[in-house]
Amino acid sequence: MQRTVQNELEDIRSRGLLRSTRVISGRQEARVSCNGHDVMLLCSNNYLGLADHPALAAASIAAVQQYGTSSGASRLVSGTMALHEELERAVASFKKSEAALLFNSGYAANTGIIPALVGRGDVVFSDRLNHASIIDGILLSGARLVRYPHNDFSSLASLMEKHAKGRCLIITDAVFSMDGDIAPLAELVLLKRRYGALLMVDDAHGCGILGEHGGGSAELLGVGNDIDIQMGTFGKALGSFGAYAAVSAELRDLLINRARSFIFSTSLPPSVLAASLAAVELVQTREGDRLRKQLCANGRFFRDGLAASGFSIPPGSTQIVPIVIGSAVITMQFSDRLMEEGIFAQGIRPPTVPPGTSRLRFTLMATHTATDLAKAVERICKVGKILGVV
Ligand SMILES: *Cc1c(COP(=O)(O)O)cnc(C)c1O
């Protein structure tokens, strides 16, 4: 049969993997209007509610008025504005690193940084459940990819013993985006030292949330100085857009010269930079503390509620709470039925997660109330029973 666009779509549909967008009107708040229905939002990464925070909006508006709407060029042409370097200094201070470099998104960071560090003849050791942007960065680099079982330090040790060659890079999500558990960073630091490897951590879901001051997973686990590249994003807990790499001054220079997604793309616009700056400041204040505590309490309340209703919830303590169902078709039925019950939770299917591990991925926000969450647990349980999942 000829491979037409129509056939291809039919094939995706028949495997229960067809994706489409759901439209939200209004802000990313605890309740949203989705495709015209008023629902509780349980799948946004606006964890601390900063995407709706007046301080970020005000900073953003002021920056547009002062600096305009675009940076006008890539960083190495004329697109480095004072705001870019101001934000980089703020990130370095926040992350306690020597330097920082901005990227246009987390995807652009991972696909730019990895090929800047390794290439043919080198080896990347990557957790099996790492984010797709990491996999794409490794493929682009031409380095050999050695995947290790999820968070399995001893398997990684034997794989490194066998395959370490050339420059080696260990790379992991810090908080796994579809599972919500945290990587054993202290153990990875030991292996990085033993084999003289570089260690890169993607803290997209930890930055702003973990650690006493929101500095992320490295702050929580006390290993910041031992991680060569701490990548994180502004689009999730920080309520803005874009990404950073917190690195040494030397590595920053190398990335400026080698990372193609940095070199060949128009830099972030003033409105975004100003919102990110306001967010980095805000998460380090007492208000940041309060939001983190609320998020953490919401996570615990929701996890405990689902577990008490009989769902098996993978171990973890973060704001990401999956119910692994297995079948992609049942997962999407679950998500659709929940939407009818007034709950927006996205079903996650391959290739985002490994085949046979389709799941509902719930994400908590500091702005959810206990009443909201209790109601959500009750409805999730009701639908779970109807579908025979619990
Ligand atoms: C969201 C995410 C990214 C991509 O970041 P964007 O800024 O959305 O492009 C990268 N890594 C992980 C682990 C993520 O969850």
Image (cartoon, rainbow, N blue to C red):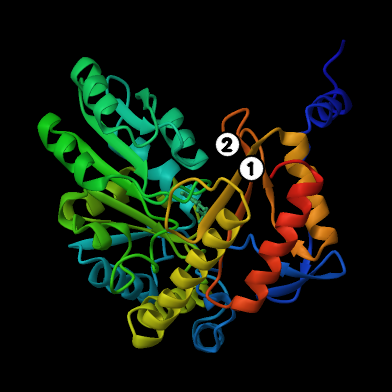
Q: Which residue is mark 1?
A: 359
On whether ligand 1 comes within 8 Å of the CB at mark 2, the answer is: no
The amino acid at mark 2 is: Val
- Callout 1 crowding tier (Cα within 10 Å): few <14, some 14–19, many ≥20: many
Q: Residue at x 31, y 58 (%)?
A: 217
Q: In the rendered image, which quarter is residue 258 located in?
A: top left
Q: Residue 100 location in percent, x, y?
A: 28, 61
Foreground pick, 64 / 164: 164
What residue did someone put label 2 on?
A: 353
Which class describes the residues within 10 Å of circle 2: few (<14), some (14-19), or many (20+)? some
In the drawing, does residue 2 fall left or right of residue 233? right
Q: Say the numbered circle drawn on residue 206.
A: none
Residue located at (63% from left, 55% from top): 309
Q: Quadrant of the N terminus?
A: top right
Q: Is residue 264 visible?
A: no
Q: Is residue 36 left or right of residue 87?
A: right
What residue is at 32 percent from the left and 29 percent from the top? 124
Q: Secondary structure at mark 2?
A: loop
Q: Is residue 146 visible?
A: yes
> Residue 189: image x %, image y %?
18, 42
Residue 172 in the figure: left or right of residue 98: right
* Total count of labels: 2
Residue 302 versus residue 188: which sits nearer the camera? 302
Q: Name the spot of residue 53 as percent of width and height, x first.
A: 55, 84
The image quadrant that residue 158 belongs to is: top left
Q: Label 1 near label 2: C-beta < 8 Å?
A: yes
The three-letter code of the residue at mark 1 reads: Arg
N-terminal of the two: label 2 or label 1? 2
Q: What secondary structure is marked by label 1?
A: strand
Q: Residue at x 52, y 60 (%)?
A: 304
- How far apart marks 2 and 1 lie (CA) works out to 8 Å
Picture coordinates of residue 35 (x, y %)? 85, 64
